[in-house]
Image (tube, rainbow, N blue to C red):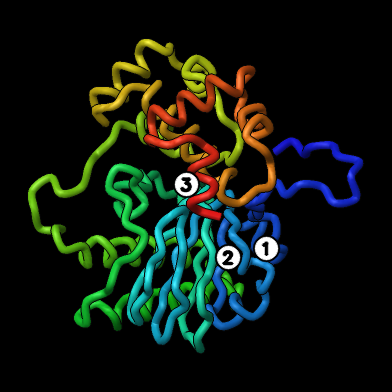
Amino acid sequence: MAKLVNANPNPKKVEPAVFSFSDYLAGAQEKLHVGTLEEGLQLRQNRQRPHRHDFYQVFWMKRGAPSFTIDFDQLPIEAHALVFVPPGSVHTFGTQNPAAGFILSFQEDFLETEGHSVNLFQECPTLDPAQYRPVLVVPESSVERVDCYCKRIFEEFNSKQEGYRAATAALLRLLFVEIRRCLPDHTAPNAFHKYSALTARFLRSLSARPYQLASASEVAKFLGVSRSWLNQLVRQETAKNLTEHLRGRLILESKRLLAHSDLNISEIAYQLGFDDASYFTRLFRQVEGSSPREFRERYR
């Protein structure tokens, strides 16, 4: 994200801050990091502020749990729950009660790096934007297995014994299997939406690069296909065309900046690529039913 140059000794906030996977010094090259929930809450007090990552996170809340806010949803969290935070989602912890569990952080291509050719959304439907659910309460019949997989991943990652990378990848896939079994509709025919590889890449690209918005043509070029073909495929598989997806992402980004930054309306419009702030205001009102200023006043 390009930084705004400001000589003012009290520069405006351009939060929510984006934390990169490289912050995990021990796991930056491994595309996976696993830690205990207790250590994570103690070591990352600065992340009580709204923030986001450029990687996926899965929280296993075994005992006690802070509440979460993910984008604009406040989520009370029960014990024996899994919390899913995809890249780009602005989130923060609420009241931090004594808690136990694990935090699994991984980059999109971790499994592929370890030789697993997988569709992440099919492997873990809770991360699929079309049926994303931030919190999954784990039924009693699955608690022991979920906890066991998380413990084993933690142990393998920290032991660094021979073959630990292959072991952590295999265990993560087993955890995803158990997550699918925990979904209440997992036995229904065609319960999980199946995307083509291209549509899945497009959907992941919407959230993978916070602040880096692009036009439909630029996205198609990035994916190596024509805009018309990508538009047809995405509309067929998601019931929305490229413009609708990109507009939805743009409005979400604007809401994040309105709620969490000190940029004024014109600066936010410029940050998002608008030459005309009044057009941005009209588009925002058309989609949200209120002006950017009204939205800011409601969430600040």
Residue 210 is left or right of residue 144, and the answer is: right
- Whether residue 182 is situated above or below residue 212 in the rendered picture: below
Identified by mark 1, the residue type is: Tyr
Spatial separation of the CA atoms under disc 3 and disc 1: 20 Å
For label 1, the residue is 24
Q: For numbered disc 1, what is the local secondary structure?
A: loop
- Looking at the rendered structure, the secondary structure element under dot 2 is strand
Q: Is residue 266 left or right of residue 11?
A: left
* Lateral position of residue 259 relative to residue 23, left or right: left
Residue occupying the point 52% across, 20% down:
215
The residue under label 3 is which amino acid type? Glu
Q: Quadrant of residue 266?
A: top right
Residue drawn at the location 13% of the way across and 45% of the way down: 190
Residue 157, percent from left and from top = 56, 71
Location of residue 8 by image quarter:
top right
Would you call the spot at circle 3 few (<14 residues within 10 Å), some (14-19), or many (20 or more)? few
**Alpha-carbon neighbours of circle 1 within 10 Å: few (<14), some, or many (≥20)?**
some
Q: Decide: marks 3, 1 in contact (CB < 8 A)?
A: no
CB under 8 Å between discs 2 and 3: no
Q: Which residue is mark 2?
A: 33
Residue named by callout 3: 112
